[in-house]
Image (cartoon, grey):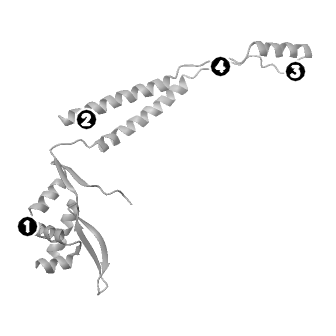
Amino acid sequence: MSKEEKYILVSLEDEKSKKIAESISNKTARKILDYLSSKEDAGAEEISKALKIPLPTVDYNLKNLKKSGLIEAKQFVWSQKGKRVILYKIAKKLIIIAPKFSDIKKELKNIIPLVGITAVISVIIQYLTRPQTLFQGTKSVTESTLAESSLAFEASRAAPTVIQQAPAYGLYFFLGALFIITIYFLIKIIRQKD
């Protein structure tokens, strides 16, 4: 079950703000809202009879009110004639209309591919800058004489395998790019608030 939001946040530029304004300015929609505020839930036919408004007009206004988020389809029941009846209720949400606001989720969706590309480039850089491994003392005991094998054993103990540690250039690249992306994102959000 998804968590129900307690508010409707819209921008003046958003299409949903237009739907809300149309619904609130419509006299029939306001009557329906008023009726639903006094009832727990009601179907379109019940609203039509109670308000003496034609059923198609009620259906039209209910669809618009639902699109705007002012009402919700609570559940459905079966009528005596076997028809499915949707019950509507008032959406108990605050409506917040902001002149401008940054859609952070949208901005993050734009940045995620950039972070992914940066990660791939970092892996490529790390792969290309990896050190070559050097091994010493790899002479086989079975191919040499006993004296040579003891010398080879002593040489391998004296000169163990040398593995060079290289700086993690790929990691440095990724962290630097991530830092720059974060700074860019913060600057963009600050500019949008102004």
Residue 64 image position (x, y, % from top left):
18, 64
Residue 72 image position (x, y, % from top left):
25, 65
- Residue under label 3: 143
Q: Residue at x 20, y 60 (%)?
A: 68
* SS for callout 3: loop
Disc nearest the viewer among 4 and 3: 4
* SS for callout 1: helix
- Residue under label 1: 27
| Amino acid type assigned to the residue bearing label 1 in the image | Lys
Would you call the spot at circle 4 few (<14 residues within 10 Å), some (14-19), or many (20 or more)? Answer: few
Would you call the spot at circle 3 few (<14 residues within 10 Å), some (14-19), or many (20 or more)? Answer: few
In the rendered image, the vertical position of residue 65 relative to residue 56, given as above or below: above
First in residue order: circle 1 vs circle 4: 1
| Amino acid type assigned to the residue bearing label 4 in the image | Ile
Disc nearest the viewer among 1 and 4: 1
- Residue under label 2: 189
Contact between labelled residues 3 and 4, with CB atoms less than 8 Å apart: no
First in residue order: circle 3 vs circle 1: 1
